[in-house]
Image (cartoon, grey):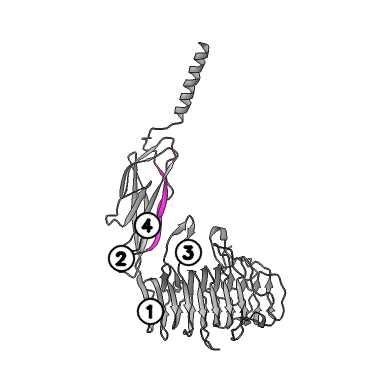
Amino acid sequence: MKHLLLYLTGTIALIISLTGCIEDGFTNSPSDRPHFSVDTLALGTLFTAEGSPTYEFKVFNPYSKSLNISRIALRDDAESHFRLNVDGVAGREFTDIEVRAKDSIFVFVEVTLPDLDLDHAVDYKRHLDFTTNGVTETVVITATALDAARMKAVTIDTDRTLTAARPYIIYDSLVVAPGATLTLEPGTKLHFHDGAELRVHGSLHADGSPGDGLIEMTGDRWGNVVGRVDYEIMSGQWEGVMFTPTSRGNRMAYTSVRNTNWGVVVDSVPYDDATPSLSLHNCQLRNSKEYALLSSFSSIRAWGCELADASSGVVALQGGHAELVNCTIANYYLFSVLGGPALQLYHASPDDAIPGVDLPLLSATVDNCIIYGNGFDLSHADLNDTDVYIRRTLLKSEGTDDDHFIGCIWDKDPLYGTIREDYHFDYRLHPESPAIAAADPALMPATLTDDIDGAPRHPNPTLGAYATILPE
């Protein structure tokens, strides 16, 4: 009997302990309300008539009993532009949504904003209400609508100017025919769809200016690819810019070309002493699956440019002529092992001349630049027997000056603002950088008076693309 009593007592205690762990009731206290991972869900700027990425936030129940959210609904979206999915169910209004104790659910939001036929952006604000135990709380949803001009497989065969009134979405290709000139006014924005390219058989004049006047060529995707990875840092979103052998006298100033497959390619474009194949003034070419800039038997004049982040190497020069002044050549590419040094020189000496190619060897000057990042900085440690001169440039390599490396700063970290592990890529310099006030003014063109931000370079010019110094 004593043993039976002990058994029953133990069994009852076990049942009590088990049932104590199970909370199958709902709290009905008005003070018990869900918590949200955001107060405002900002969808950012979106093109009209284009479906947005999917955005999400979480709804938490911090209590020891389940919450019953009696109603979830958008208060002010009669036009049904916004789409919801709550805990795996799509709809516009939801009732009796259970969030179990110490658990959470996801809410997903998408939107397609209507064409507005306006040259300015329009802000949208919607209120997503959650009613729990008689109390309503709200998550605000914001978006900015921007109308865009759409160009599908367009060939420009007479001179044409694109303005900054609206951004352009390029599908398939934008082609400049031989003899035609495409002019981009300050502030023009070209957004290229997957697989699209800009191919220049004629001439491109991209004449930007600092600040709002920056010309941009990038992809047409918004938001995050996954987690904290923004489309802004994803290469391969569109093909790139190609200048072909019939092209002439191209120039780009205060222009940003980003997120390409093959970057900017200049292929056998004629030039003379006065007119290079492509002139780049205070430009940004960054984030390419291949090269940021590839010049083959052409002439490149790059002054004050950021050339950065490319899988195969940042800049490749094959024959022809190049003049790089106050450029930052940096490589912290994220998505693959680097395929080669940041600055690569080909067809530069008799020993590395391309067999069977009877074209002049590369001649180049690299002045007041910074060449630093992951991987090697230069493809050539020895420039003897070349017409390549690197002067007053900060290099990652250990080395000493000679007849081709003149007044260089060796093996010094320029202290970029880039934090690769945080997906933050900023090639402006910290105040302690050895590149600050280290440039030789005698090597700078008189017209290189400011940087891409509009910051003045003088009286004590800094190496690299940026005169702008990051705050301490």
Which callout, 1 or 2, points to the residue nearer the camera?
A: 1
Going by the numbered disc 2, the residue's amino acid type is Asp
The residue at which mark 2 appears reads as 115
| Distance from the alpha carbon under mark 2 to that under mark 3 | 24 Å
Q: Is residue 149 visible?
A: yes
Q: Label for residue 39?
A: none
Q: Is mark 2 in CB contact (under 8 Å) with mark 3?
A: no
Question: Measured from the top left, where is residue 207 in percent x and y?
Answer: 45, 79
Question: Measured from the top left, where is residue 128 in percent x and y?
Answer: 34, 50
Compare marks 2 and 4 and give the one earlier in the sequence: 2
The residue at which mark 1 appears reads as 155
Can you tell which quarter of the image residue 438 is in? bottom right
Quick one: which residue is furthest to the top in this view? 1
Taking the spot 46% from the left edge, 62% from the top edge, the residue there is 231
Going by the numbered disc 1, the residue's amino acid type is Thr
* Mark 2: few/some/many CA within 10 Å (<14, 14-19, 20+): some
The residue at which mark 4 appears reads as 142
Which callout, 3 or 1, points to the residue nearer the camera?
A: 1
| Distance from the alpha carbon under mark 3 to that under mark 1 | 28 Å
* Mark 3: few/some/many CA within 10 Å (<14, 14-19, 20+): some
Compare marks 3 and 1 and give the one earlier in the sequence: 1
| Distance from the alpha carbon under mark 3 to that under mark 4 | 20 Å
Quadrant the C terminus occupies: bottom right
| Distance from the alpha carbon under mark 1 to that under mark 2 | 25 Å
The residue at which mark 3 appears reads as 232
